[in-house]
Image (spheres, rainbow, N blue to C red):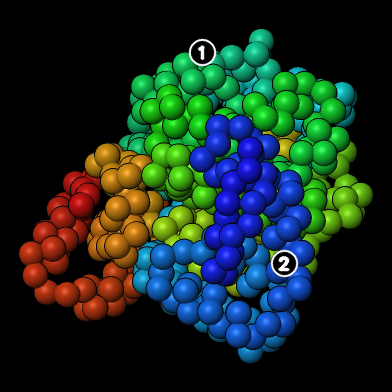
Amino acid sequence: MCYDVNINGGTQSIMYNPKSAKAEEFISHEEILDTLEWADKNKNNEELINKVLDKARLRKGLDHREASLLLACEIEPKNQELYALAREIKEDYYGNRIVLFAPLYLSNYCVNGCIYCPYHKKNTHIPRKKMTQEEIRREVIALQDMGHKRLAIEAGEDPVNNPIEYILESIKTIYETKHKNGSIRRINVNIAATTVENYRRLKEAQIGTYVLFQETYHKESYERLHPTGPKHNYAYHTEAMDRAMQGGIDDVSLGVLFGLERYKYEFAGLLMHAEHLEAVYGVGPHAISVPRIKKADDIDPSAFENGIDDDTFAKIVACIRVSTPYTGMIISTRESQKSRERVLELGVSQISGGSRTSVGGYTEQVYEEDTAQFDISDRRSLDEVVAWLLKLGHIPSFCTACYSSHRTGESFMAVCKNEQIHNFCTPNGLMTLKEYLLDYASPETKKLGFEAIDRELKKFPEGAMKDALLKNLDLISSGGRNYKF
């Protein structure tokens, strides 16, 4: 199918259709190659780059071609304009709050042959483990006792050991587990591509966001990197978000594993996927993750030739932020403290803290190294991460209010695209921060946190919202929990 794309005032017919249901048409290899060639040709075209930056300043986003031009730009003053704009957009949409979460690995049984992941079926080094529901309860209590309210559950693809029934039972266990003042209020799910019916069941189980990394949008590389197992099917995997949307899940999260393929190719594909969701469903991705390949059990990242340095990584984050202002951005403990600090101001709005990437890692330390999916670079405790964020001037947030208030999908996007989401996020963030300080924080973190709350309250505009916020903060001091706007 040919599709006429408007490119800088002209049209070009190519095999690309963002409204198509077929993976190879909404992620068009030919269109990506043409985009990269065009961007490279114009990487020093200051007039064109200025036009794209001016468009980005309107806060309406950029298409994959325009964003690829900024990524390719070699004019350093223009790159500095890009970084400054990314900081402004991050502040305008999300303020200074950073949402915290933790991964929970349920099982590392997997039937796939992914050559970048230690869970691959042929790996005999790694002990296989699947948690029982009682073990899951203990892990959840450990996470609650840290202060976490939001989890992302992970499991390898194995229809025998990790069927959808196991995932659903685990979700029920997590939501039902309460300890002291602790509760998990939002569960995001990162499991293999599945059917519309199974996505419908996940929605009925009240999951938050469905997360699925594409790993790479380059079909030939994808099939080479996934030589065996169900994940080998490029189209089925790439079209998973469509099935999730059809199953009623309106918050989905995209991501590639940078280092597997050329980063400019992946960047263009990632934005094309976002454009596809917007074109078909009217809702782009709720979040985008930006992981880089890291060392793991039998995985050596140096064996992959497309690794990216910290400067390139920071530029990718900035380009995603100005291209999709409405989208949350996630960075995990794969990255070091230094790397995470740099990209927080450029666009990242969610980070993990105190994470374990092994099955049973929060309660059974013996498994931490043996069953880990990847090595952690930032090994600080959650309390240390919270204190660090406070020192940087951020507001650590454990908020799940949008999810519990049904402010998801189109409803969330309508608020976010009008730059109003921070009006909810700031007060909700302050309330959940106060909960954390009272229930879990160390004395030093508690002092930093209460000082931060006082500063934010002084900046908060007078009116009914502030009066309600102050009332709720007082109720939290008296033992109340889970207030929200």
Q: Is residue 215 left or right of residue 226?
A: left
> Quadrant of residue 367 in the image?
top right
Please identify the residue farthest to the right as the structure is shown.
303
Identified at 52% across, 50% down, the residue is 275
Q: Position of residue 350 (x, y in %)?
A: 49, 56
Identified at 87% across, 38% down, the residue is 298
Q: CA distance from mark 2 to mark 1?
A: 48 Å
Ranked by sequence position, the earlier of labels 2 and 1 is: 2
Question: Which part of the image, by quadrant, shows the N terminus?
Answer: top right
Q: Position of residue 209 (x, y in %)?
A: 45, 38
Taking depth in this image into account, of 121 and 265 the one nearest to the observer is 265
Q: Which residue bears the numbered disc 2?
A: 38
Q: Amino acid at mark 2?
A: Trp
Q: Is residue 257 above or below residue 231?
A: below
Please identify the residue farthest to the bottom as the structure is shown.
77
Identified at 76% across, 27% down, the residue is 232
Q: Position of residue 335 (x, y in %)?
A: 67, 58
Q: Amino acid at mark 1?
A: Glu
Q: Which residue bears the numbered disc 1?
A: 165
